[in-house]
Amino acid sequence: MQDYHNLLVWKRSLEFVKLVYKLTKLFPKDEIYGLTSQLRRSAVSVMANIVEGRGKNTDKDFWRL
């Protein structure tokens, strides 16, 4: 598996996830299972896709994702 920790896009996605979590804490409590959950899951999904793509064997596979 190739290292993804040094990728600028991964570092920015980590900052994005932290920002989304910080902002969604300000949402009304009745949104905790609705919009808040959906936004948080989608932000984490960005990071997961980067990690998954970096785990591919070749750069061609990485860029295809």
Image (cartoon, helix red, strand yellow):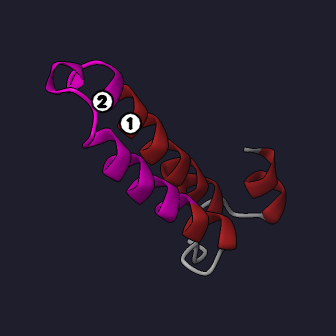
Q: Position of residue 54 (x, y in %)?
A: 63, 63
Q: Secondary structure at mark 2?
A: helix
Q: Are marks 1 and 2 in contact (CB under 8 Å)?
A: yes
Amino acid type, callout 2: Ser
Bounds of the magenta segment: 13-37
Amino acid type, callout 1: Arg
Residue depicted at 80% across the width and 46% down the height: 64
Could you tell me how far apart the alpha carbons at marks 1 and 2 are, in whole angstroms?
6 Å
Question: Residue 9 is drawn in which quadrant?
Answer: bottom right
Q: Which mark is residue 8?
A: none
Name the one closer to the observer, 56 or 21: 21
Name the one closer to the observer, 21 or 9: 21
Q: Position of residue 38 (x, y in %)?
A: 38, 27
Question: Residue 56 is drawn in which quadrant?
Answer: bottom right
Q: Residue furthest right?
A: 60
The residue to which callout 2 is attached is 37
Q: Main secondary structure of the magenta part?
A: helix
Name the one closer to the observer, 29 or 49: 29
Residue depicted at 33% across the width and 52% down the height: 22
Q: Secondary structure at mark 1?
A: helix
Q: Residue furthest bottom?
A: 6
Q: Quarter holding the C terminus?
A: top right
Residue depicted at 51% across the width and 53% down the height: 47
Q: Position of residue 16 (x, y in %)?
A: 51, 55
The residue to which callout 1 is attached is 41
Disc 1 packing (10 Å; few <14; some 14–19; many ≥20): few
Count how many numbered circles sit on residues in the image.
2
Residue depicted at 28% across the width and 32% down the height: 27
Residue 45 sits inside the magenta stretch: no
Where 25 sits versus 12, above or below? above
